[in-house]
């Protein structure tokens, strides 16, 4: 919104809207240097023991130029499943009805946005409500050689798994009395 004030034949434009928007933006921010209290992590993430791993899939990894990554079309799912099994934090179940949490993992190509080739994603769902409790997304960098693309996918998987481990091993919030 702009107010126009006329004085002596001159037109002065006052950017009232800009001033109001700036004031609102500043009012919603904490003071500089102030610590922001972290939002709570859903309790089910800490208490879950049984996990069903769901394959969100990968887009077709066979392109006119050849196969993008080594392995088959379920590489991301198989790799994530193996890492979760080796970690041993969760009991992996074969039926989502038996799970406390559902981990959905998959890969999607980027829309020609170098240096990103695609995105690796992990969603943590509550199987009872089907609500996404937490999401991890990591970019996979472009590479010309398949070996380097494999390495970049492995690095992204390591970041996702590391983020998950950091999240579930932090101190769970104390229950409210």
Image (cartoon, helix red, strand yellow):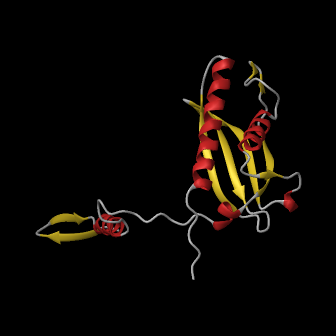
Give the tally of numbered discs: 0
Q: Is residue 157 above or below residue 168?
A: above
The answer to which quarter of the image holds residue 133 is bottom right
Q: Is residue 148 above or below residue 48?
A: above
Quadrant, the N terminus: bottom left
User: Which of the pair 111/27 is nearer the observer?
Assistant: 27
What residue occupies the far left of the structure in this picture? 8
Quadrant, the C terminus: bottom right
The answer to which quarter of the image holds residue 56 is top right
Image check: 46 left or right of 170? right
**Residue 58 visible, this orientation:** no
User: Which of the pair 2/90 is nearer the observer?
Assistant: 90
Q: Is residue 154 above or below residue 167?
A: above
Residue at left offset 14%, top offset 67%: 9
Q: Position of residue 37 (x, y in %)?
A: 43, 66
User: Which of the pair 99/145 is nearer the observer?
Assistant: 99
What residue occupies the far bottom of the structure in this picture? 177
What residue occupies the far front of the structure in this picture? 88
Q: Position of residue 88 (x, y in %)?
A: 74, 46
Q: Position of residue 148 (x, y in %)?
A: 63, 20
The answer to which quarter of the image holds residue 159 is top right
User: Which of the pair 176/113 is nearer the observer?
Assistant: 176
């Amino acid at each position: 919104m702009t107010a126009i004030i006329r004085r002596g034949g001159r037109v002065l434009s006052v950017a009232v809207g800009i001033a109001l928007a700036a004031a609102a933006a500043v009012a919603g921010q904490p003071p500089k240097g102030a610590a922001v209290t972290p939002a709570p992590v859903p309790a089910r993430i800490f208490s879950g023991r049984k996990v069903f791993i769901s394959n969100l899939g990968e887009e077709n990894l066979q392109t006119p130029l050849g196969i993008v990554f080594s392995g088959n079309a379920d590489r991301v799912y198989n790799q994530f499943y193996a890492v979760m099994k080796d970690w041993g934090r969760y009991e992996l179940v074969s039926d989502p009805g038996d799970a406390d949490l559902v981990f959905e993992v998959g890969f999607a190509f980027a829309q020609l946005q170098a240096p990103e080739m695609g995105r690796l994603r992990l969603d943590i769902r509550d199987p009872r409500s089907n609500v996404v409790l937490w999401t991890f997304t990591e970019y996979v960098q472009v590479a010309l050689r398949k070996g380097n693309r494999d390495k970049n996918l492995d690095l992204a998987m390591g970041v996702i798994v590391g983020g998950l481990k950091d999240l579930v091993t932090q101190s769970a919030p104390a229950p409210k009395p």
